[in-house]
Image (cartoon, helix red, strand yellow):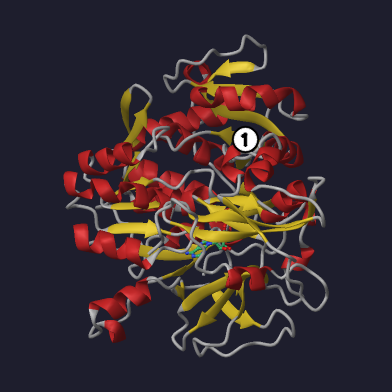
Amino acid sequence: MQDRPLALPHVFHRAEQYFGHKPLVTAEVDGERTTTIAEWAERVRRLATVLDTLDVSADGRVGTFGWNTARHLELYMAAPCSGRVLHTLNIRLFPEQLVYIANHAEDEVVFVDRSLLPLLWPLVDRFETVRHYVVIDDGADVPVPDDPRVHDYEALLAAATPFAGDFVVADENTAAAMCYTSGTTGNPKGVVYSHRSAVLHALITLIADGAALSEHDVVMPVVPMFHANAWGLPYGCLLAGSSIVFPGPNMTPQAVARLLERHRVTVTGGVPTIWMGMLPLLADHDLTPLRTILCGGSAVPRALSESYREAIGVPMLHAWGMTETSPIATMSVLRSHHAELAEAERADLRARQGQPVPLVDLRLVDPGTGEIQPWDDVTSGEIQAAGPWIAAEYYRGEGGGAQFTEDGWLRTGDVAAVDRYGSVRLVDRTKDLIKSGGEWIGSVELENEIMAHPKVAEAAVIAIPHEKWVERPLACVVVKPGETLTAEEVIAHLEPRVAKWWLPDAVEFIDEVPKTSVGKFSKKTLREKFGGYQVPGQTPVT
Ligand code: ADP
């Protein structure tokens, strides 16, 4: 067979050649902007020469700091097709993390949505390698700094000559894109996607026993384009020829529901928090064309999926993965042998994380002994993953060699039981992190801040379930002998030290933090103790 590279230029040329008439819609601050794939492709060609004009190195990192927009999709293609590496910066990270990441990746240019300038601009003097800031004007009423490093996106495109001919990336193992993921402790770690992994992963969004993206679809990725390449949906859509609707900066449930209805969206994807927020609005919107809601990033509550099924006939398509797995690793799709089951049992199955998609291998391993565990749906162990779009290491081999086994599998830090058909059911997490609304909160960092309080002897922070955010932090605090401390004082102490959305929802005072046999905090014991924890005044989790 011919040895042809699996590379993104193929995806670009395919979209340009066959799907030029298909629309790309972006919701902006002051209305909607509609273009076609043909116009988009011409702009991608211009953007590729803009990167040359800006003197971005042949394999330089191109940072983006943006919402989900068609212009972000231009960067998604122009950077990798011209040999550069797309680096999507997560707009929700703390300033220190952003500075670390941009410097670690050695971003040479950052493309920033005008509405996000207030978040980015205060940091630029700490970015050591960025030479240019290109402002994408999304209509926001935000001043653009008068600075020689600042350029206007549209002005650069207008002045550029479109790259002519075919884009070529000869080696499919060349880096195409990168994303950083939070570490439990220490610095974020970079995951680098290759052209090969991006193309193969895009194909997976097309499989029938999955999201099944096709040319007939209108797809709205609500999951941010800075979260593991929006779960591969943008590249998948270009490969399939689907129309795309980008929600832009307004991600309120009302705005999302309006877009789904107005554009007759058939496939969408986002974290559970988005869909929880939209639940009360379902009755007021005609979402008849919608057939698939891809949902993951956190466990999808059974009740949420069922509420959607009852209201609009579409349950969530539950998927599991992580930045290191590109991210799609499993999808919960009912099989032929489930056809006769009662609806309640089918709902139970849909609440599982699901079976590995083709080309992904999983195994269940006892974290203590390293022994492979049986798939009996009872025995639990850590899920390890292997496959062509699963990371083999972190960028520059840093920060987490321990996360890869000697025989080349990724330790996911997720604990699961697996049934005999390979369906994964997550039961716990070994990584010390809390996932709130799809974003990570570092429990260890919170603990360290609390333990810095002079009256605190020990503190452990665990996740408790939350109706909207899925998980929220609970601080378990041990006060020093002879001292008194209130929950309000703990929160007041944290306020200047951590982001507002990191503040624990509740503080519990305990006599001692339970320890493991080697003297580490036993979060497992705490999680068991506070399993059904109910924060006073909050909606109970069903
Ligand atoms: P993403 O950008 O896809 O959220 P991250 O790398 O930030 O990826 O987070 C991955 C982690 O999120 C997983 O290891 C797991 O702990 C959690 N997660 C992702 N999907 C699910 C799911 N469907 N159910 C439970 N936890 C999930």
Q: Is residue 486 above or below residue 462?
A: above
- Location of residue 44 in the rendering, given as x and y in whole percent from the top left corner: 47, 33
Q: Is residue 503 above or below residue 163?
A: below
Disc 1 secondary structure class: strand
Dividing the image into four equal quarters, which quarter contains ligand 1? bottom right
Nearer to the camera, 398 or 515 = 515
- Location of residue 339 in the rendering, given as x and y in whole percent from the top left corner: 24, 82
Residue type, mark 1 in image: Gly
- Residue pushed farthest front? 482
Q: Is residue 362 above or below residue 449?
A: below
Query: Quick check: 439 left or right of 444?
Result: left
- Location of residue 143 in the rendering, given as x and y in whole percent from the top left corner: 54, 12
Q: Quadrant of residue 443?
A: bottom right
Residue under numbered circle 1: 63
Label 1 environment density (alpha carbons within 10 Å; few <14, some 14–19, many ≥20): many
Q: Residue shown at 70%/87% (left/top)?
A: 371
- Location of residue 45 in the rendering, given as x and y in whole percent from the top left corner: 49, 32
Query: Quick check: 454 left or right of 372?
Result: right
Q: Residue shown at 74%/66% (left/top)?
A: 513
| Residue 7 shows up from this direction | no
Q: Residue shown at 76%/30% (left/top)?
A: 129
Q: Quadrant of residue 88?
A: top right
Q: Residue shown at 34%/31% (left/top)?
A: 27
- Residue pushed farthest top? 146
Query: Quick check: 21 left or right of 3?
Result: left
| Residue 229 shows up from this direction | yes
Q: Is residue 61 above or below residue 429?
A: above
